[in-house]
Image (cartoon, rainbow, N blue to C red):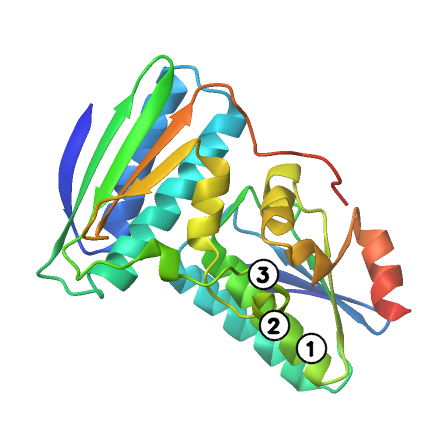
């Protein structure tokens, strides 16, 4: 099952929800807010959500986008869920490393690894 | 050389970012340098519009950008009360690691070669030397 939810492509595989971020640049506060709301809704839909965020299309992200991810990660954890990030480009991953967020988030090199990690 | 006052508006900021980035493309800056300049300029403009001018439409943001053969220097000045950059908590300490704020200035400092503020704290000046690339790329995934 695949559906287009605004700026996100949402796909279900087993008990894992995969969300592909389709914007190349996640910089605009309005876009970040829209993405955050949609993902919050997905997390709130059921306890113990298994959520994979795929960053394949993303070239640029601001610190506000990192903040949004931190909030989502907390929400997922609070509802006994799991958030896994994958396909983060090296320059963006560098921002995670600089801010030590690579220690906060579970990140995987590709989608299949992320799905396995989320459902484990 | 660009020297402009833009309204306190994210769309105007985005347009100016693209204008400055197009100069770095024309000057042959590599992808890593352009990534660093875009990220830092975006962070500086968002700080100026959001925290400096508090989204007040009557206020302006003044931006100058000198894209040279060897380096790019960008200055972003808002009309706000200013702040003390030293007072921003370190987001990488254990107690702040999951707080959803305070990373913009750290990223600017990491990606640019020089970042400084005026005494009033309402103007940031950033320099990126050409071909210095990203801060470090070890340990990806």
In the image, residue A79 sits, relative to residue A115, either above or below, namely below
Which residue in the structure is indicated by mark 1?
A76
- Residue drawn at x 57%, y 73% is A71
Q: CA distance from mark 1 to mark 3?
A: 18 Å
- The percent coordinates of residue B52 (x first, y second) are 23, 59
Which residue in the structure is indicated by mark 2?
A72
Of residue B88 and residue A113, the one placed in the foreground of this image is B88
Query: Crowdedness of circle 1 by 10 Å Cα count: few (<14), some, many (20+)?
Result: many
Work out whether disc 2 and disc 3 sit on a shared chain. Answer: yes
Q: Is residue A6 visible?
A: no
In the image, residue B39 sits, relative to residue A101, either above or below, namely above
Q: Chain of mark 1?
A: A
**A76 sits to left or right of B87:** right
Q: Quadrant of residue A78?
A: bottom right
Q: Secondary structure at mark 2?
A: helix
- Residue drawn at x 45%, y 29% is B34
Counting residues from the N terminus, which is met first, the one under dot 1 or under dot 3? Answer: 3
Counting residues from the N terminus, which is met first, the one under dot 2 or under dot 3? Answer: 3
Q: Chain of mark 2?
A: A
Q: Return the mark for residue A8.
A: 3
- Residue drawn at x 31%, y 45% is B14
């Amino acid at each position: 099952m695949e559906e287009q939810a605004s700026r996100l492509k949402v796909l279900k595989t087993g008990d894992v929800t995969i969300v592909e971020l389709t914007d190349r640049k996640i910089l605009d506060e309005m876009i970040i807010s829209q993405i955050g709301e949609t993902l919050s809704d997905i997390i709130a839909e059921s306890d113990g959500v298994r959520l994979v965020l795929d960053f394949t299309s993303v070239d640029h992200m601001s610190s506000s986008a990192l903040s949004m991810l931190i909030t989502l990660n907390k929400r997922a954890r609070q509802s006994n869920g799991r958030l896994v990030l994958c396909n983060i480009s090296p320059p963006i991953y560098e921002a995670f490393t600089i801010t030590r967020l690579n220690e906060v988030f579970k990140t995987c090199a590709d989608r299949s690894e992320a799905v396995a990690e989320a459902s484990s | 050389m660009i020297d402009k006052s833009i309204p306190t508006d994210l769309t105007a900021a985005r347009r100016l970012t693209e204008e400055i980035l197009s100069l770095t493309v024309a000057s042959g800056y590599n992808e890593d340098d352009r990534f660093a300049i875009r990220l830092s300029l975006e962070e500086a403009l968002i700080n100026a519009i959001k925290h400096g001018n508090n989204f007040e439409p009557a206020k302006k943001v003044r931006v100058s950008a000198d894209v040279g053969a060897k380096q790019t220097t960008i200055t972003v000045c808002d009309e706000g009360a200013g702040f003390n950059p030293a007072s921003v908590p370190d987001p990488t300490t254990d107690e702040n690691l999951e707080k959803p704020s305070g990373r913009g200035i750290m990223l600017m400092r990491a990606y640019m070669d020089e970042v400084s503020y005026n005494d009033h704290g309402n103007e940031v000046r950033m320099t990126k030397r050409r071909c210095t690339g990203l801060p470090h790329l070890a340990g990806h995934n």
